[in-house]
Image: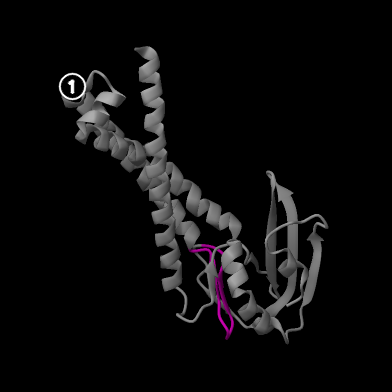
Amino acid sequence: MPGRRSLSNLLLIVPAFAVMGAISFAATWMLQQWQLLRCPANAFLVASGPEATIFQIIPIMIASIGFGFLCTNWVAQLIPSLRRFFDRDAERYNQPGYQRSQRGLMRSSMIVLLVMLPISIAASLSQYCLLEQGILYQAGPWTGLRSYSWNDVAKVETRCARSKGSWSGSYVSIMRDGASFDVMTWPGSFARAYPDMARALHDGKFIFSSEGVSRRCTHTNVGLLLQRP
């Protein structure tokens, strides 16, 4: 029945997207571990800025699409009850045409992966390492990690604005040579690292500005956004 087949095909998307999510999460976690390895062991906050993080995650998500459907089709093929549910003409799974289509999907998925993975890896090289002794920051893949002292922080700008139905916060450190980076890419990690960062900045001579924080801001870290370290 066409209606039943449409429903089963729609339900097939659900586990495929679950697999895609798992692949994306695992790959993002591996990139974060790679960033940790590039920083000293005593770093209390390691991450990339929001823009670089987007260029890490989006290519991974795109590359995971084909593999999500491949894994789902493979599992459905192995389990007869699932095979019959998702396609009443279940024997087609053993036909040459279906096998060719799966090999084609595998090839295209590998090509997309080979194109997208270098983008994510290159974006992950743009990162910062916050340590008690100072800051290591790499603006782009080609620049290398540059060392700063906490006295090199010239200004801290905080912002909070509503974006796509939720409040988005930022905590931007601006160095005396003009380099800048947002340390609130991951709000939970930022909140945990804030006491260490506040101690490191406490005696520094820098400008603090929270003018970009909306009075209506309900961000989780709004108290930290309004407070000078």
The picture quadrant where one finds residue 37 is: bottom left
Depth check: give the residue in front, 65 or 127: 65
Q: Residue at x 69, y 81 (%)?
A: 201
Whether residue 43 is visible: yes
Say what secondary structure mark 1 lies in.
helix
The picture quadrant where one finds residue 52 is: bottom right
User: Is 127 left, or right, of 222 in this rendering?
Assistant: left
The picture quadrant where one finds residue 66 is: top left
Q: Quadrant of the N terminus?
A: top left
User: Is 206 left, or right, of 143 in this rendering?
Assistant: right
x then y, percent, for residue 53: 54, 56
Depth check: give the residue in front, 80 or 19: 80
x then y, percent, for residue 91: 18, 21
User: Is 93 left, or right, of 28 in this rendering?
Assistant: left
x then y, percent, for residue 55: 52, 52
Q: Residue at x 17, y 23 (%)?
A: 95
Outermost residue, top side = 1
Q: Is residue 136 magenta?
A: yes
Q: Is residue 110 magenta?
A: no
Give the extent of the magenta segment: 125-140
Work out whether 165 lies above or below 102. below
Name the amino acid, label 1.
Answer: Glu
x then y, percent, for residue 155: 75, 73
Depth check: give the residue in front, 43 or 52: 43
Q: Residue at x 22, y 22 (%)?
A: 90
The residue under label 1 is 91
Work out whether 221 lies above or below 203. above
